[in-house]
Image (cartoon, rainbow, N blue to C red):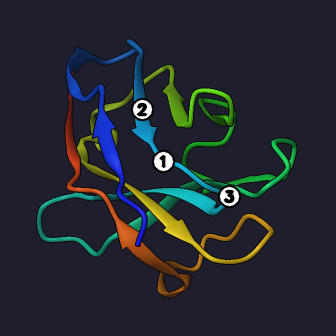
Amino acid sequence: QVQLVESGGGLVQAGGSLRLSCAVSGRYVMGWFRQAPGKEREAVAAIGWQSDNRTYADSVKGRFTISRDYANKMVYLQMDSLKPEDTAVYYCAAARGYSASVVVQEYDQWGQGTQVTVTS
């Protein structure tokens, strides 16, 4: 069982940036998901074993970037041009497999979540 530890959430004004970090050891497909109050958990971005294998939700394309650093055992989510609708608890998750996936049911290991709040 892989242990996932997220960090980097916080409060930011619209148009600002945050970077989320997730500590993970081993080769997993990694994803970032978010859940706003009263809404279902949704995929934000995912990355496969190869760092150029990435996929994004349409709502964040061009604003968010997922990356991974095997040497430091980290996965990152760089969030730029943040909007109030990006406000949610963000979760790092791991899945077995090779290619990036945004199918939430494929992820069986989850971090504790980190709050991101974007004010207008």
**Would residue 7 be found to the left or right of residue 79 on screen?**
left
Residues packed near mark 3 inside 10 Å, few (<14), some (14 to 19) or many (20 plus): some
Residue 11: horizontal and vertical position, in percent?
16, 21
- Locate the C terminus by quadrant: top left
Mark 1 residue element: loop
Tell me which amino acid carries mark 1: Val
Residue 21: horizontal and vertical position, in percent?
42, 32
Front position in the image: 107 or 56: 107
Mark 3 residue element: loop
Which badge, 3 or 2, is on the more N-terminal residue? 2
Q: Which residue is mark 2?
A: 21
Quarter occupied by residue 27: bottom right
Tell me which amino acid carries mark 3: Arg
Tell me which amino acid carries mark 2: Ser
Q: Are marks 1 and 3 in contact (CB under 8 Å)?
A: no
Q: Which residue is mark 1?
A: 24
